[in-house]
Image: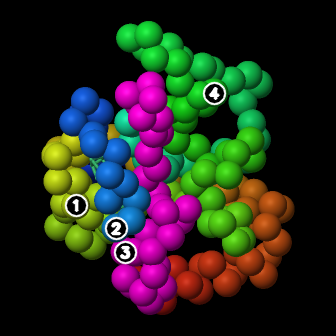
Amino acid sequence: MGEKKKKIIKTIKIDADKCSGCRACEVICSAFHAAPKYGTTNRARSRIRLIRDPLKDIYVPVYAGELAAAECMGRDKYVIDGKEYDECAFCRASCPSRDIFKEPDSGLPLKCDMCEGESEPLCVKWCLPKALTYEEREEEVEEEVKLGEMEIGLQALVDKYGLQKVVETVVQMAQKV
Ligand code: SF4
Ligand code: SF4
């Protein structure tokens, strides 16, 4: 058992019934994470992507989660209230099976960081229909990120993208902090 420590749990509640499909969340996310900040917008670089199919009345925002080094053994496909969604539609992973949640040029994984440093995630702030709501609470959890795990993650990236790309990205990230 690891040591317990306090952790802030950050949650964005998504009321998909209120989503208008405007994609403002995708635009602001890509602008906030551009280098320089707000220098460009490119929805393909957003850490939130909208499942959008107006003909089926489908508008569901999905946030980028962790990198998946390998595909799952099988895929899921949902039908909810008579609406059929694409394969893996609700998955948050940056996964080899698809292009979303990856930098369009380098293919490096994108992950929502809850707009670290801002008082509130910008996608929440910019969602005028208020489909997104931000909540924080404190929880006692076991100490999680051990150096070993971090090394494993880095090794996976190096295997996939090459050491130079990983180093360049780390440098870019360091400049944004
Ligand atoms: S900004 Fe809000 S309403 Fe617009 S697409 Fe994003 S979640 Fe939906
Ligand atoms: S919380 Fe920030 S990083 Fe995450 S999707 Fe929203 S705008 Fe992007």
Q: Which residue is mark 1?
A: 126
**Magenta stretch holds residue 46:** yes
Highlighted range, magenta:
30-58
- How many other residues sit within 10 Å of disc 2, few (<14), some (14-19) or many (≥20)? many
Precedes in sequence: disc 1 or disc 4: 4
Tag 2's secondary structure? Answer: helix
Residue 80 visible in rendering: yes
Measured along the vertical axis of the image, is residue 87 above or below residue 157?
above
Q: Is residue 146 left or right of residue 6?
A: right
Q: Where does residue 67 sit, x and y in percent of width and height?
A: 62, 50
Name which residue type carries label 2. Answer: Ile
Mark 3: C-beta under 8 Å from nearest atom of ligand 2: yes
CA–CA distance in space, label 2 to label 4: 27 Å
Q: Where does residue 64 sit, x and y in percent of width and height?
A: 49, 50
**Magenta stretch holds residue 123:** no
- Which callout, 2 or 3, points to the residue nearer the camera? 2
Q: Which residue is mark 2?
A: 28
Mark 2: C-beta under 8 Å from nearest atom of ligand 2: yes
**Mark 2 touching mark 3, by CB under 8 A?**
yes
Mark 1: C-beta under 8 Å from nearest atom of ligand 1: yes
- Image point (59%, 28%), residue name: 86
- Image point (45%, 74%), residue name: 41
Q: Where does residue 78 sit, x and y in percent of width and height?
A: 53, 17
Name which residue type carries label 4. Answer: Glu
Residue 39 is drawn in which quadrant? bottom left
Q: Which residue is mark 3?
A: 32
Name which residue type carries label 1. Answer: Trp
